[in-house]
Image: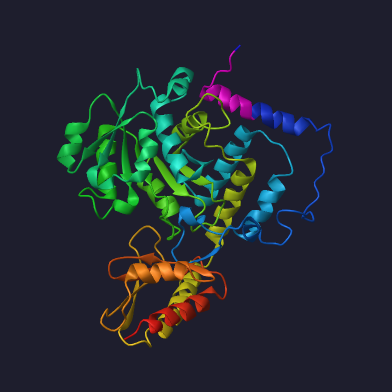
């Protein structure tokens, strides 16, 4: 008999796995030695050098193309512990989601799931809204025959990440005003989607967008992938009433890079999980999250909530101030502090210069830094370069200051 992928059997599999865990023991004694002595790859201590890949000093931030962030040692430690046993992934997801929801003090009726990044959370979240716990619908995605098929989104909120929404087969309906929204709602409308980092760009702001969705009795999802800090964002949108909220796990929280969070209503999170790995013949089967990443994400949230965020901000600003104090000794060079309004909301700095005094373009400076040894990555724009320091390791701010000063001085008139 084919396995039925509805919510009842999903919860039943959790109960069965729990009973097995309580009453059964493995017949095989697997070795669980820690910290093995490596030979071959890893023997030198730097796997990237061994593979011929250049490591970089990251002054750009939690960019996926650079590997996100560096996981905390405690996260690495619990992931190693998680790798020493087999478990029911369904049971683990339920337990991890419950623990995260408790730590975040989410509203009654809300829970969490660990997903394959915020992008995976977006796709599985919408998939769950489209299919519910219907096995046939889960298997047929992205074929939306018989299903709702439209997602309302502000035109200014369109971005490369909405490919995850389109991957379900859904059509994105662009709007700009509340009147547009009301006109766009019809029997095919499945969800309202909001890209939080675009809040300032859209005509409809985060609270009004939710109000429109509630008036239409249609679920609303908010993508808040890189929107911590502040730490309160982890519960702000749930308390506001958004039905689903997505976060990246491998950014400021410094969890596993391939992990993310889907927070929201228990029914919708449950449907999202049914559309995901480890279940076969689902749209999200390729978005696998291992037992190690699930446990690692729980630990990352625990640690992130316990941090002294004001002290961290002060430390990050101190690093930038040190760099600024060096480069501004060069005539014509200016350093300006800034903090992005939403995504990557951390102390940052823009460095600009008088092109008559320093004959160097922003592109040339960024490329020179990238080709330096060690390689340094910063953001460039039309006016100069921009950087933050919250992904820097001890001593790297000093390296950046020295190299920046050297390059700028070498091109001074």
Specify the segment rendered in magenta.
Answer: 2-14
The picture places residue 104, in percent across and down from the top left corner, at 50, 51
Task: Tell me the residue at 38%/48% (across/down).
Answer: 237
The picture places residue 384, in percent across and down from the top left corner, at 32, 71
Residue 321: in sight, yes or no? no
The picture places residue 88, in percent across and down from the top left corner, at 66, 33
User: In this figure, which colouring scheme has been used for the structure?
Assistant: rainbow
The correct choice, above or below, for 402 with respect to 71 in the image is below
| Total numbered labels | 0
Specify the quadrant that holds the N terminus.
top right
Verify whether residue 52 appears in magenta.
no
Q: Main secondary structure of the magenta part?
A: helix
**Nearest to the observer: residue 65 or residue 107:** 65
Residue, far left: 179
Task: Tell me the residue at 43%/30% (across/down).
Answer: 128
The correct choice, above or below, for 386 with respect to 194 in the image is below
**Nearest to the observer: residue 287 or residue 410:** 410
Q: Is residue 116 left or right of residue 242?
A: right
Residue 1: in sight, yes or no? yes
Verify whether residue 10 appears in magenta.
yes
Task: Tell me the residue at 54%/57% (across/down).
Answer: 254
Task: Tell me the residue at 47%/35% (across/down).
Answer: 269
Specify the quadrant that holds the C terminus.
bottom left
The picture places residue 40, in percent across and down from the top left corner, at 75, 53
């Amino acid at each position: 008999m084919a396995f039925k992928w509805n919510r009842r059997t999903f919860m039943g599999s959790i109960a069965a796995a729990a009973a097995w865990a309580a009453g059964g023991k493995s017949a095989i004694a697997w070795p669980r030695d820690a910290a093995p002595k490596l030979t071959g790859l890893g023997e030198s201590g730097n796997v990237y050098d061994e593979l011929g890949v250049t490591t970089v000093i990251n002054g750009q931030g939690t960019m996926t193309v650079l590997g996100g962030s560096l996981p905390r040692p405690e996260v690495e430690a619990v992931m190693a512990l998680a790798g020493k046993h087999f478990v029911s992934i369904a049971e683990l997801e339920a337990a991890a989601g419950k623990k995260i929801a408790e730590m975040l003090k989410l509203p009654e009726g809300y829970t969490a799931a660990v997903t394959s990044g915020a992008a995976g959370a977006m796709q599985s979240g919408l998939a769950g809204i489209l299919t519910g716990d219907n096995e046939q619908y889960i298997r047929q995605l992205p074929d939306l025959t018989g299903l709702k098929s439209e997602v309302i989104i502000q035109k200014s909120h369109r971005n490369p990440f909405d490919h995850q929404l389109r991957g379900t087969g859904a059509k994105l309906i662009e709007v700009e005003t509340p009147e547009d929204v009301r006109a766009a709602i019809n029997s095919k409308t499945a969800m309202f989607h909001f890209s939080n980092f675009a809040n300032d760009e859209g005509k409809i702001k985060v609270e009004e967008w939710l109000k429109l969705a509630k008036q239409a009795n249609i679920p609303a999802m908010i993508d808040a992938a890189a929107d911590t800090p502040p730490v309160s964002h982890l519960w702000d949108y749930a308390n506001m009433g958004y039905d689903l909220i997505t976060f990246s796990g491998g950014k400021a929280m410094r969890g596993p890079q391939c992990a993310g969070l889907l927070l929201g209503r228990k029914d919708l999170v449950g449907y999202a999980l049914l559309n995901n790995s480890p279940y076969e013949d689902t749209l999200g089967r390729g978005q696998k999250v291992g037992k190690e990443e699930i446990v690692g994400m729980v630990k990352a949230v625990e640690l992130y909530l316990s941090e002294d965020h004001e002290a961290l901000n002060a430390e990050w600003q101190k690093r930038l101030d040190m760099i600024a104090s060096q480069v501004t000794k060069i005539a014509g060079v200016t350093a300006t502090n800034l903090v992005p309004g939403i995504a990557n909301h951390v102390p940052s700095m823009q460095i600009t210069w008088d092109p008559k005094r320093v004959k160097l373009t922003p592109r040339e400076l960024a490329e020179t830094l990238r080709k330096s040894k060690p390689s340094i990555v910063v953001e460039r724009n039309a006016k100069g370069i921009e950087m933050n320091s919250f992904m820097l390791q001890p001593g790297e701010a000093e390296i950046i200051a020295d190299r920046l000063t050297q390059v700028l001085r070498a091109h001074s008139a």
